[in-house]
Image (spheres, grey):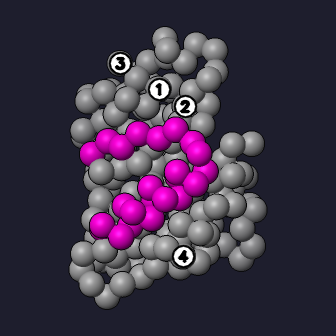
Amino acid sequence: MRFQAIWIAAAACAALIGCKSSTDVTPDQRTAFERYLDGLQVEYTQQGGVYRVVANSDREGYESAPEIEAGDSAYLYFAGYTFASSTRKLYYTNMQSVADSVKGLDTEYWSYDPWRIRMGVTPMIKGLGNGLPGCRQGDSVALFITSDLAYDDKQVGMVGPNTAVMMIVNVEKVIK
């Protein structure tokens, strides 16, 4: 599976990004993402500072699938991972199979229902808001988000200050 290559090499990217005390780690994080993605030899785009890899753009019907645009609703499954150290860590998902694969994860209050968003209305980290437009119904997407577009210099749950994140997003449905 294409995302396995992304997971395997994620540790290399994480090691390059690291955790700095400086408030501006964004250039280092971008450089690390670019090296990582170039090393994988995958096609990616950059949109609003977010690096996006569509793993299944070769599927039948891709070009005619509805795209997420401002004001549209979409149903998403996702998994969020930190890139703060040499290991990636799941910090939240609504994909039960992903959560079940992580030993010792406390998911008592997690929902496994798809997340319904309305683009431009639903609160979300800036990186998701920048990376989701143009994604199509049926896409499996990896979004690489620098800390300034994620949680910035704040500690949010398991995500430390100045931490880059990777979001794996499956776009189940787009409603125009």
Q: Nearer the viewer, residue 21 or 114?
A: 21
Q: Is residue 109 visible?
A: no
Q: Which of the two labelled residues, at mark 4 and mark 3, occupies the earlier sequence position?
A: 4
Q: Nearer the viewer, mark 4 or mark 2?
A: 4
**Position in image of residue 114 (x %, y %):** 54, 41
Q: Pointer 3: residues within 10 angstroms few (<14), some, or many (20+)? A: few
Find residue 62 and report its image quarter: top right
| Magenta-highlighted residues | 26-48
Q: Earlier in the sequence, mark 1 or mark 4?
A: 4
Image mark for residue 176:
3
- Which residue is label 2 attached to? 139
Quick one: label 1, few (<14), some, or many (20+) residues within 10 Å?
Answer: many
Image quadrant where residue 151 sits: bottom left
Q: Of the numbered discs in the image, which one, if any, rests on residue 15?
A: 4
Q: Which residue is mark 1?
A: 136
Residue found 61% across the figure and 75% down from its top? 87
Asked if the magenta segment contains residue 45, the reply would be yes
Q: Secondary structure at mark 3?
A: loop
- Give the alpha-carbon distance from disc 1 to disc 2, as whole Å: 5 Å
